[in-house]
Image (spheres, rainbow, N blue to C red):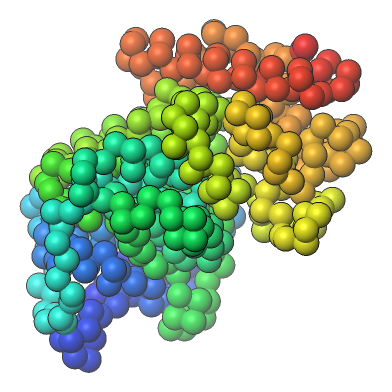
């Protein structure tokens, strides 16, 4: 199939007191022309950066462009086998030479991230003429910059980060808002911080509201893609934009447990980029190289690369102050990958009538339950479906979709939970360095041993047999 040509164009606002907007255009099947005005609410970020002219801003615009290109080009329509698309993306940038320096490495990072065949073309942009007055912010108060999604990992990153702050410093939490679900998680957490006076004066949050504007289609609306494989690059772009403005050497913290980050396929049918690679170390390493080539020296750091979600919980709870904060806030976080698919849930509200946030049967939910159980909180959180109830999960019925992740996990524990298989999957996903291969393999063996112990603790005879216990 031929490559889809995608063009990003900037249109100035009617007045220089406002930032304009970006339009994404592409030619679809049978020559159909599509154009959509993109959401790009970045005033909060700009209040910190005070900038629309740096290389970090170019990278933010590039990240916005990639994220939305990934969203508008349907895999079902524009790939031959249902996954890999050929996309030729043209993006306006101010620092043309620097962005071209990084083009080859950026392309490699994107191909790995989304499983597609990208071709990048940067074109010279005109300077942004904007004289909007923004509240001046003292950037020197920020000692750390961390991505904050509202999930349990980012919550632990927030709690750990506050404990590491120097006196009179703050942690800057950078978040992405588009669909509303993740934003509501962030709001719950930070509202409870205020209510219970947790980390008062130690943090600030900034949001970028970016994505497809459903009311912004200029002609007819395209069929969009729902896999969101490029979401992390927009998140990182927003974080780098802020971190670079605070200090060109300020690291960007990307809190993600290593089990999900490495995300090895549980069965051979899940191999390749069909498994998400949003914070995979190979992607982050390639992206770090690309940033350096364009002149950005802020490091991308995941301090939890060799920790499972259970490790993160146990380590955080070793400190009494951090444990007390987590005990209040963990229930506000959400780790679920399938919370919008509630049709098959057995419970949608808890005994107090509050909405249940977690399906209980997707892999992130399962890893969350293992983590909470590791600190004695496993029975406190309700889920839509209990995987240890064979009737609820439909374990014996191959037609019931909600049991697929749990079945794949049990199959992995029974058949593929060994050093050779794990090493092979890591190599297949780009991990070649000997020391990294050894570290990641040993870590994953420990991580899945925690899962296996949890299954052995709560599973019935049928579940244990399927897990090889």
Residue 151 in the image: state x and y as whole percent: 51, 47
The answer to whether residue 20 is above or below residue 263 is below
The residue positioned 87% from the left and 41% from the top of the image is 392
Residue 240 vertical position relative to residue 456 in the rendered view, above or below: below
Of the pair 467 and 31, the residue shown nearer to us: 467
Relative placement, left or right, of 109 versus 192 is: left
Spot the residue most to the bottom.
14
The x, y position of residue 272, in whole percent, is 52, 32
> Can residue 255 be seen in this snapshot?
no
Q: Residue at x 84, y 51 (%)?
A: 346
Say whether residue 360 is left or right of residue 330: right
Quadrant of residue 25 in the image? Answer: bottom left
Residue 269 versus residue 87 in the image, above or below: above
Who's the residue at 52% across and 18% down the image? 444
Q: Quadrant of residue 19?
A: bottom left
Quadrant where the image shows the C terminus: top right
- In the image shown, does 355 or 197 lie closer to the viewer? 197
Q: Is residue 391 left or right of residue 66?
A: right
Quadrant position of residue 418: top right
Which residue corresponds to the image point at 62% horizontal and 33% vertical from the top-left?
372
Q: Which residue is more in the foreground, 41 or 358?
A: 358
Visible in this render: residue 45? yes
Q: Residue 455, percent across and down?
A: 74, 22
User: Residue 278: where, in percent of width, then height?
Assistant: 43, 42
Numbered-mark total: 0
Up the image or down, 120 lies above or below 27; here it is: above
């Amino acid at each position: 199939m031929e490559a889809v040509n995608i063009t990003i164009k900037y249109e100035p606002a009617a007045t220089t007191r406002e930032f304009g907007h970006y339009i994404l255009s592409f030619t679809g099947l049978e020559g159909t022309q599509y154009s959509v005005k993109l959401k790009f609410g970045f005033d909060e970020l700009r209040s910190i950066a005070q900038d629309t002219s740096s290389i970090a801003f170019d990278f933010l615009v590039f990240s916005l462009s990639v994220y939305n290109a990934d969203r508008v080009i349907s895999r079902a329509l524009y790939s031959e086998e249902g996954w890999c698309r050929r996309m030729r993306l043209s993006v306006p940038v101010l620092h043309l030479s620097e962005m071209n320096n990084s083009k080859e490495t950026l392309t490699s990072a994107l191909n790995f991230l989304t499983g597609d065949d990208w071709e990048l073309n940067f074109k010279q942009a005109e300077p942004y003429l904007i004289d909007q007055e923004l509240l001046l912010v003292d950037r020197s108060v920020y000692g750390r910059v961390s991505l904050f999604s509202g999930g349990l990992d980012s919550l632990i990153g927030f709690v750990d980060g506050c404990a590491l702050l120097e006196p009179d410093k703050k942690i800057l939490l950078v978040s992405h808002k588009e669909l509303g679900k993740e934003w509501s998680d962030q709001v719950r957490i930070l509202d409870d911080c205020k209510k219970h006076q947790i980390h008062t004066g130690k943090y600030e949050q900034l949001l970028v509201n970016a994505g497809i504007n459903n009311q912004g289609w200029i002609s007819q609306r395209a069929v969009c893609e729902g896999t969101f494989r490029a979401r992390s690059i927009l998140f990182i772009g927003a974080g780098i934009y802020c971190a670079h403005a605070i200090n060109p050497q300020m690291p960007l913290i990307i809190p993600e447990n290593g089990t999900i980050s490495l995300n090895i396929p549980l069965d051979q049918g899940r191999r390749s980029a069909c498994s998400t690679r949003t914070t995979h170390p190979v992607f982050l390493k390639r992206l770090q190289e690309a940033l350096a080539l364009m002149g950005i020296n802020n490091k991308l750091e995941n301090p939890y690369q060799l920790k499972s979600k259970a490790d993160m919980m146990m380590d955080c709870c070793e400190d009494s102050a951090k444990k007390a904060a987590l005990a209040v806030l963990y229930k506000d976080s959400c780790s679920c990958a399938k919370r919008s698919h509630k049709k098959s849930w057995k419970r949608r509200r808890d005994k107090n009538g509050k909405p249940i946030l977690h399906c209980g049967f997707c892999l992130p939910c399962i890893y969350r339950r293992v983590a909470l159980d590791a600190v004695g909180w496993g029975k406190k959180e309700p889920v839509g479906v209990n995987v240890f109830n064979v009737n609820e999960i439909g374990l014996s019925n191959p037609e019931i979709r909600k049991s697929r992740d749990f079945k794949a996990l049990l199959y992995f524990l029974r058949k593929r939970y060994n050093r050779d298989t794990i090493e092979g999957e890591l190599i297949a996903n780009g991990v070649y360095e000997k020391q990294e291969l050894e570290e990641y393999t040993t870590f994953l063996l420990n991580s899945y041993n925690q899962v296996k112990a949890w299954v052995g603790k709560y599973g019935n005879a049928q579940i244990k047999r399927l897990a090889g216990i």
